[in-house]
Amino acid sequence: MLLEAQVQAYPLLMEELQASVAEQQALMAAMDEKHDHRGTEHEQVSKQLTHRVKVVQDELAKLKEMFEQHQDQQPEDKLYSRAYKLAELGADVEEIINECDLPRAEAEMLLSVYKKKIR
């Protein structure tokens, strides 16, 4: 009798197991799909970040080049700043030429600009 009950319960047990297996397979398929979707998202984000890094590197290279150009111009700018400061202190053209190694025309022009500014 116990054996008969077990044999009769066998088809029900098989149905439950098959349903459980089907449910597990459906869950696995859903997880695989979700994983694939996330993988695609991660790939897209990675591509976007790579692009952004490239843009920032390009901008940094441009800024570095501009900085180097600015540094190359600084000695000349310092001469003109010094010449202008001498003009403020009342130096004449000859003194500006001698102190700053500027050509006469540039020293005269700088002095002229300074005098127009203070008027």
Image (spheres, rainbow, N blue to C red):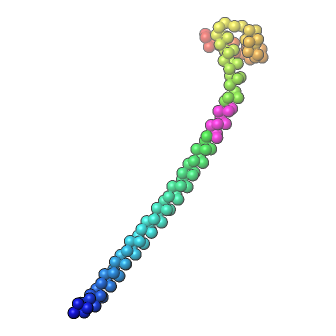
Q: Is residue 1 left or right of residue 53?
A: left
Q: Which residues are magenta?
A: 61-69
Q: Is residue 43 above or below residue 29?
A: above
Q: Is residue 105 left or right of residue 57?
A: right
Percent of width and height locating residue 67: 65, 33
Percent of width and height locating residue 69: 68, 32
Question: Which residue: 59% across, 46% down?
Answer: 55
Question: Which residue: 45% across, 65% down?
Answer: 35
Q: Is residue 50 above or below residue 1?
A: above
Number of numbered labels in the structure image: 0
Question: Which residue: 67% across, 11% down?
Answer: 86
Q: Quadrant of residue 74?
A: top right
Quarter of the image where the C terminus is located: top right
Residue lying furthest front in this view? 2
Residue lying furthest left in this view? 1
* Residue 102 in magenta stretch: no
Percent of width and height locating residue 78: 68, 20
Percent of width and height locating residue 68: 68, 33
